Every structure is written in structure tokens, then in C-alpha cells.
Image: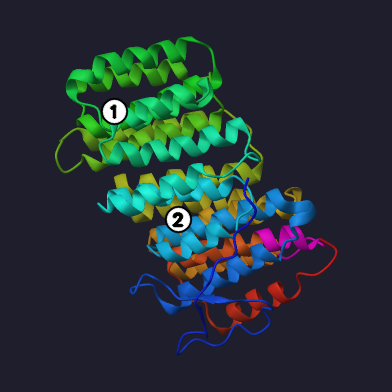
Amino acid sequence: MTTLIALALLLTLAPQGEPAATGAPGTRAIASSNPSLAPHQSRLLDLGRDAAEAIPVDPHERDRARVQEVVARAAITLGDLKRAERCAGEITTWRRGAVYGELAAVYAERGDRAEAERFMRLAQDLGPRVLDWQRDRIRVGVARAQAILGEAERVRELEALVSDAERGKITAVRAAKATPEQFAAILEDVRRSTASGSLDATANALETCIELAKALDADEARWSEIDAVFAAANGKVARELYIGALLRLADVRLDDVAAHATAREKAGALLAQVKSVRDQVRWAAESELPITASIARRVARADGNDAGISELERGIAAFKSNEERVANVFRGQALRPAAEALLALGARDRALEVYRWAIESGALNPNARPRAEDLAETCASIAVAGIDPDEAMWGRLNAIRAGLVDPW
């Protein structure tokens, strides 16, 4: 991998109306490239970025890069692409290429071919330090951008270069652009993948089916074939992956509610199946709550926000009763999705309570590295959620940043 390139950053003071980031040593503000980004969102991204960069590269380069990627992707979600580019440029591992690939896809979706091509080149120009599996993951992101641009031949060329584990992901990319005439051939590939017994191939087959359903506005005959693939895959992939795929398939049904009379009923059946799969497993509390938060969001879409909040509150109560058994390094990653879901379902005050809970949980570890990771991820989450922290929350976030010192 090439060495980290020093970027000429446009440094600004804290925006008017926002208190300076006192207690956050080293924070360097980046001017937002999205004029609709609120000042508090920009400030949260700066604080998260600074917390991530506080982690020493030696010996924590991988952990540092992972949370830098989290902040960069949060900037992409908020439409601040220049900030995301600058954040990505500071990553010293293959994850820089992964962010560049995502930026290429976003620019392709915006119709900016020149920028999409630039980021595709940057994504793939990472030098010899990148391992083969890492390069393959980057190529999947590049293939997505190429597919959006209509470069089918270039997508096929990349597909031929990657390992079997990643090839199915590019098949899913192609499925997103499939025509009705291509459905049968792609589905036959999917069936072969699920019959192979490979966990990676089966997981990729499920993603391909989701993309087919989205791309083709699948009629019920095709839906039956897709449902059969999911049934055949049950038990062949990790439960978390299977549940996630079922939920994304439910999203496709819910997106069709306005156009298809039976879509809500079909989505309800998928959600019932998800709950059944979840309830068959005795999960660790930190694993179950994010799953329940994802389910609650779909329950709300199908049956209203009150139903979704009730589903989620049961999950939060279960987590609370088992909290002492959860290592403090895992508590924040369970609580953040719950807070995000509560906010999405209109329960703002309750979401703030859960965010405060997550902040305090993330500050418990005696080592600074996990505290830094948790702070960066929480700041990114709050920024994307759109919450403007009150003075007390700002003070707590900055105090945690100020405390990021040895031992790491």
C-alpha cells in the first residue's frame, strides 16, 4: 500500500453558533461540502474523526482504520463527499480503497462520470501492501460503480479477477441491473451457489436474490422462486446474515405496498419468519439487541411506529436485564442501533436516553483504544441521526476525548 498522502485540508474554526470543541485536543475542523449539513453534524464528524486519529498506528493500525472508515462512511451518508474523501485519505490500510469505491458509486449515481472514474482509479491504486482478499473487496465496490455507469463489460472483467468468495457479490451487482430475460440464468447460478455448500457462496446468492427482486418488480411466480432459494439457504449461513437478508427482502415487499395489494401481507409473513429464526437462537445480549432494532424498524413500516417501538422496548429491557454480563467494549455497539431506531420511529427523548447510556458504557474501559473507538462510532451515529447534543452531552463527549491517553 502506498504511504499515507498528506492532504492540504481547508481548516476552519467551529461554525457560528456552535461552542468550540473544548476538551477535544487535536480536533481539526473540516469545511463541509454539503451546504445543508447542520453545524452540529459537522462538529460531531470532526470529533469522531479526531478520536479515531488519536489511536496510535503502531500497534493499532487495523482498529484505527476501521473506525476512520466508520466516520468516512457517515460523511458519505450525510452527503458530505469532500469530507469523506479527506477522511479516507488519512486511512493507512485497504479500507481507504473501500471508501473510495463507495465514493465512486455515489458519484456514479449522481451522474458525475469523471469523479466516479477518478475514485475508481484511486480505489485500485493502493500498492503491494494490500492482500488479495482485501483487493477483491475493493473491486466489488468498484464493480458497483461500473454497473451504475452501465459498464457491463468492465464489471465482467472484474468478476473474472476476484476469488470465489467475492465473485458472488459482483453477481449481485449485475443482478441489480438485470432484465426480465436474464432472470432465469441468474437464478440458476444462484441455485448452484446454494447447492455448493459454501457459506460465502450461499450468502452471496441471497444478496443476488434481493437485487433481482428490487430490479425486476418480481411477479409472484418469480417471488416463489426467490422464496425457495431463501428456504434452501436456511441453516447454511450464519443466523445474523440470514436474518439480515430476510429483512432486506421484507424491505422490497414494503417498498411495493403502494403498488401491490398483497405486499404488506407478504412482508408480514417475512417478518414473522425473521422473528422465528431469531427466537430459535440463544443470543448474547449484545448480538440480539441490534437484530431486534432492525426488526422493529420493519415492524413500524408494516404496522405503525407504536408497534415498532413496543418491539424495540422489549429488546432494550432484555438487554438491560443482562447488561452486567456484557463486556463494556460491546455495550455501545448494541445500544447505538437501538437509539438510531428509536429516533427513526419518532421517540426522540427515549433515543437520547439510550444514546447517553451508550456514551457512558463506551467510557468504562480502562484502556484508551476501545474508548476512542466507541467515541468515534457514537459521534458518527449521532451525526447521521441528526441529533443536536445539548450542552451536557457535548461536555461529556469532549471530556471522553480529552481522556484518551495512555494506556491504549
Provide the residue span drawn in magenta. 363-373
Q: Position of residue 22 (x, y in %)?
A: 64, 85
Nearest to the observer: residue 25 or residue 265 = 25
Q: Which label's residue is closer to the chain start, 2 or 1? A: 1
As drawn, the residue found furthest toward the right would be 407
**Secondary structure state at the residue bearing disc 1:** helix
**Residue 202 visible to an observer of this rendering:** yes
Q: Position of residue 296 (x, y in %)?
A: 43, 47
Q: Quadrant of the C terminus?
A: bottom right
Residue 199 tag number: none
Residue 212 tag number: 1
Lateral position of residue 384 relative to residue 375, left or right: left
Nearest to the observer: residue 181 or residue 31 = 31
**Residue 296 visible to an observer of this rendering:** no
Residue at horizontal 49%, vertical 20%?
A: 201
Going by the numbered disc 2, the residue's amino acid type is Ala
Residue 206 image-quadrant placement = top left
Residue 341 tag number: 2
Give above or below for 46 relative to 105.
Answer: below
**Secondary structure state at the residue bearing disc 2:** helix
Residue at horizontal 55%, vertical 35%?
A: 135
Going by the numbered disc 1, the residue's amino acid type is Leu
Q: Position of residue 290 (x, y in %)?
A: 54, 47
In front: label 2 or label 1? 1
Give above or below for 349 relative to 166.
Answer: below
Say whether residue 372 is magenta: yes
Q: Do the residues under discs 2 and 1 have CB atoms within 8 angstroms?
A: no
Lateral position of residue 291 relative to residue 78, left or right: right
| Badge 2: residue crowd in 10 Å (few <14, some 14–19, many ≥20) | many
Lateral position of residue 61 relative to residue 147, left or right: right
Q: How many marks?
A: 2
